[in-house]
Image (cartoon, rainbow, N blue to C red):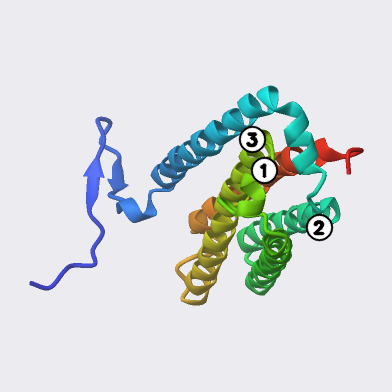
């Protein structure tokens, strides 16, 4: 049976007509659902931060010693890279709302570029540790103090999980670009980009906490 394109109308108690809105266009529902998702992400990383805090309290000296071996320069550069990428992500949303489509797409591309730069820097960081024999369950790592083993276990787990979120962010931004190109995301229907921008805010916020926990506590020991 052929589906009618005529909008369905309902009436409230006062007799005023209202068009029935498909759930895909439900702005409030989309925002609420995404905030619930972000809450689960906060619980995930929050639990890991609590674990780090607990073991840091028990093995403070070992954690400081292990932290001093990390490359704080690369960690600092990555912090600035994410902060700058967040700026461009936010500006892309503003451009889209102002119907500046080309500018919005350009800023999303720039955000993706900075995301890739972050991953490349993190790759070289990880490879440096691995080439030194520091990776989970390696003989060199297992020969260290128990606190150092715990530190690097948390380091690879938490930064690795954060890296996965960066990759997911790149995929989401690529999807948004596709939606903009086919005109499903516009200056009047921008909730997808708004949610992706919120997601990216979470990604950069998590790193803002990861950086001091893993890199800064070792300053002065190295």
> CA–CA distance between discs 3 and 1?
29 Å
> CA–CA distance between discs 2 and 1?
18 Å
Say which quarter of the image contains residue 218: top right
Circle on res. 146? 3
Which-is-in-front pick, marks 3 and 1? 3
Q: Nearer the viewer, residue 88 or 23?
A: 88
Q: Earlier in the sequence, mark 2 or mark 3?
A: 2
What secondary structure is found at the residue carrying circle 2?
helix
Q: Provide residue 100's location: percent of width, then percent of height.
A: 66, 68
Q: Which residue is mark 2?
A: 74
Circle on res. 205? 1
Marks 3 and 2: in contact by CB < 8 Å?
A: no
Around disc 2, counting alpha carbons within 10 Å, would you say few (fewer than 14), some (14 to 19), or many (20 or more)? some
Q: Nearer the viewer, residue 148 or 161?
A: 148
Above or below for 2 versus 11:
below
Which quadrant would the C terminus be assigned to in this image? Answer: top right
């Amino acid at each position: 049976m052929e589906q009618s394109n005529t909008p369905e109308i309902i009436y409230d108690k006062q007799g005023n007509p209202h068009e029935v809105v498909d759930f895909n266009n439900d702005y409030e529902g989309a925002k609420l659902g995404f905030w619930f998702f972000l809450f689960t992400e906060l619980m995930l990383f929050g639990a890991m931060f609590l674990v780090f805090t607990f073991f840091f309290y028990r093995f403070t000296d070992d954690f400081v010693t292990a932290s001093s071996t990390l490359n704080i320069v690369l960690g600092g550069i990555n912090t600035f890279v994410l902060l700058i990428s967040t700026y461009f992500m936010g500006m892309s949303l503003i451009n889209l709302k102002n119907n500046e489509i080309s500018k919005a797409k350009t800023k999303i591309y720039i955000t993706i570029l900075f995301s890739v730069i972050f991953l490349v820097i993190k790759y070289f960081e990880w490879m440096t540790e691995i080439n030194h024999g520091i990776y989970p369950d390696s003989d060199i790592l297992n020969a260290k103090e128990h606190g150092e083993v715990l530190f690097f276990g948390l380091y690879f787990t938490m930064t690795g999980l954060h890296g996965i979120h960066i990759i997911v962010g790149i995929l989401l931004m690529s999807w948004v670009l596709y939606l903009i190109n086919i005109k499903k995301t516009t200056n009047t229907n921008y909730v997808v980009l708004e949610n992706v921008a919120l997601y990216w805010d979470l990604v950069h916020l998590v790193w803002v906490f990861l950086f001091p926990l893993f890199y800064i506590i070792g300053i002065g020991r190295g």
